[in-house]
Image (cartoon, grey):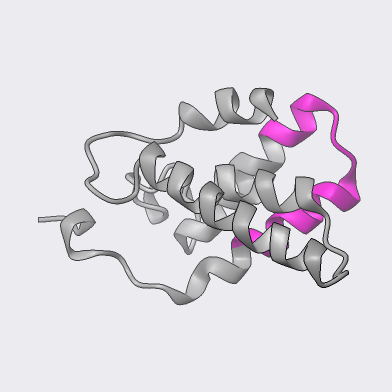
Amino acid sequence: MDRLEEAAKDYYTEELEYHNFSHVQDVLDSAENILQRTEDHDIEVDEDVIIAAVYFHDAWYQKDPEELGFETREDVSKKVARDELEDMGYDEDFIVGVEDCIESTKHHSMPEEDSPE
């Protein structure tokens, strides 16, 4: 997964207090715990899809999605993930799984510290 990490890092900025690459690393830690629990309970999930989605779930969060031609930040992140994963040779089913995971993050709101002034 090192290729994914390297590709994803460029889409985050440390200018945001919350939605930066440290946030991605925190989410990865949480995902690893959840994946371990799913394994402990014999629940099948595609670990690689989950990890890839974590890397890209807030990609380009610092940019205005409408200025990029998208409705939501998740739409931007899905496009970034698709482009990067296609370039790396991942298949369509894998990419769609990653996009679905990213879409599932739509429920949360922007932390106050990342809100535009």
| Magenta: main secondary structure | helix
Residue appearing at x 77%, y 51% in the figure: 47
Name above or below for residue 89 compared with residue 91: above
Count of labels shown? 0
Residue appearing at x 28%, y 51% in the figure: 18
The picture places residue 24, in percent across and down from the top left corner, at 46, 45
Whether 99 is among the magenta residues is yes
Name above or below for residue 33 compared with residue 13: below
The picture places residue 44, in percent across and down from the top left corner, at 88, 65
In this picture, residue 58 sits left or right of residue 86: left
Name above or below for residue 4 compared with residue 71: above
Residue at far bottom of view: 107
Residue appearing at x 67%, y 23% in the figure: 3
Residue appearing at x 64%, y 42% in the figure: 81
In this picture, residue 35 sits left or right of residue 33: right
In this picture, residue 82 sits left or right of residue 40: left
Quarter of the image where the C terminus is located? bottom left
The picture places residue 94, in percent across and down from the top left corner, at 84, 48
In this picture, residue 65 sits left or right of residue 99: left
The picture places residue 61, in percent across and down from the top left corner, at 39, 48
- Dividing the picture into quarters, in which one does residue 97 lie? bottom right
Q: Give the residues drawn in magenta, as a range.
A: 84-102
Quarter of the image where the N terminus is located? top right
Whether 111 is among the magenta residues is no
Residue at far front of view: 40
Q: Quick one: 41 or 117, which is closer to the camera?
A: 41
Q: Quick one: 113 or 25, which is closer to the camera?
A: 25
